[in-house]
Amino acid sequence: MSLSRAAIEGVLISHGMSYDEINRALAPSPQIIRNAQELEALDPDTLLINRDEDEGVLTARDLLSCGKIYRAEWLPAVKVAEGAHVRACREAPERDA
């Protein structure tokens, strides 16, 4: 599953977050993921974006499930949201219903 940054922002805005809060949540600290070992160490729900923004955003889980050739082409990538933040976004609509 690939989510665009705009889609993630839309969910966060719908739950009352300001743009400043969204920017802090989506980029708490830049971390470059350069290889499979660094990728495997991440929370599987962590969101990553690579240098080619047309590729969209992938979870660490999705990227790990890709073949080695695609993964090598996709890396390096930058962590844009922690897995805990992503899970909170997924769970928020269920809590609010």
Image (cartoon, helix red, strand yellow):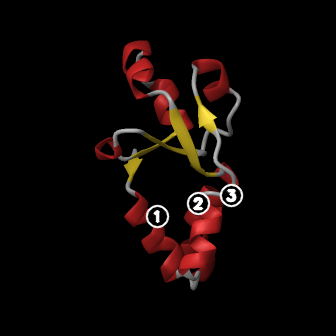
Residue beneath disc 2: 26
Residue beneath disc 3: 28
Amino acid of disc 1: Ile
The local secondary structure at tag 2 comes to helix
Query: Is residue 62 at least partly visible in the picture?
Result: yes
Foreground residue among 67 and 72: 72
Q: Residue at x 63, y 75 (%)?
A: 21
Distance from disc 1 to disc 2, alpha carbons, whole Å, reads 9 Å
- Neighbourhood count class around disc 3 (C-alpha, 10 Å): few under 14, some 14–19, many 20 upward: few
The local secondary structure at tag 3 comes to loop
Tell me residue 83's x, y (percent): 65, 49
| Residue 74 in the image: above or below residue 95 | above
Tell me residue 34's x, y (percent): 57, 25
Determine the image quadrant of residue 25: bottom right
Tell me residue 76's x, y (percent): 50, 29
| Residue 7 in the image: above or below residue 93 | above
Residue extending farthest to the left is 54
The local secondary structure at tag 1 comes to helix
Amino acid of disc 3: Pro
Q: Are marks 1 and 2 in contact (CB under 8 Å)?
A: yes
Q: Are marks 3 and 2 in contact (CB under 8 Å)?
A: yes
- Neighbourhood count class around disc 2 (C-alpha, 10 Å): few under 14, some 14–19, many 20 upward: many
Going from N to C along the chain, the mark reached first, 1 or 2, is: 1
Q: Residue at x 34, y 46 (%)?
A: 53
Distance from disc 3 to disc 2, alpha carbons, whole Å, reads 6 Å
Residue beneath disc 1: 8
